[in-house]
Image (spheres, rainbow, N blue to C red):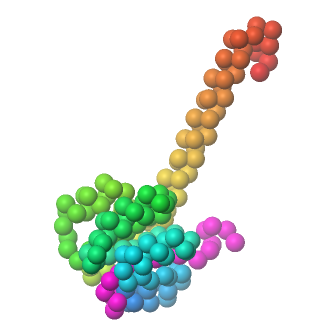
Amino acid sequence: MSEESRQKSVLIIEDDINYGEMLAYALSHLKYEVHLAYSATGGLDMVRQKKLDIILSDLNMPGMSGLEVAQRILKMYLDIPIVLITGMNDLSLVKQALEIGVSDYLVKPVSIDQLPVVIERNLQRKLLEKKMLQENKADALFKALKALMRALDAKDPYTFGHS
């Protein structure tokens, strides 16, 4: 099965049980594979156990905030997009979240119609970032090989131009 056609795996970290279940129900009907954690620590455990494509996390949770969860996840797995869900439209928190590497944010109540758009946009953005990074690595490797070949040519006049 190709990467494009397989069911996308979404982790929802939400301490409000009813709200989390509502989001999970909606996403499962939109054909996503949904995992639900009711706490920050439960979410971190799931990140270690499951292959996830994207994480939706509440910002305000007891014990550990969504920002702290995001920081820990981003240290472990840089390529998983994280979308924070918050009940308040606090620009300073949003700015702080984006600075640490959070992909996006949503303000509660989340529009179910917008959810797949946000998920797909963030998955596509991460895919493009990964592709650009691979291209940059390939380009750097090619330049390094050319430099090595020039150094080899400069060292031995007999093999100059043959490497």
Q: Is residue 161 left or right of residue 10?
A: right
Q: Tell me residue 118's x, y (percent).
A: 40, 70
The outermost residue toward the bottom is 18
Q: Is residue 89 above or below residue 158?
A: below
**Measuring 31% from the left and 80% from the top, which residue is drawn there?**
110
Q: Quadrant of the N terminus?
A: bottom right
**Measuring 49% from the left and 53% from the top, which residue is drawn there?**
129
Q: Quadrant of the C terminus?
A: top right
Q: Tell me residue 7's x, y (percent).
A: 58, 77
**Measuring 67% from the left and 18% from the top, which residue is drawn there?**
150
Q: Is residue 107 left or right of residue 45?
A: left
In the foreground, 19 or 38: 38
In the foreground, 112 or 22: 22
Q: Tell me residue 49's x, y (percent).
A: 54, 74
Q: Tell me residue 106's x, y (percent).
A: 31, 72
18 is within the stretch colored magenta: yes
Q: Is residue 92 above or below residue 114?
A: above
Quarter of the rendering containing residue 3: bottom right
Q: Which residues are magenta?
A: 1-19
Q: Is residue 114 left or right of residue 49?
A: left
**Measuring 53% from the left and 47% from the top, which residue is drawn there?**
133
33 is within the stretch colored magenta: no
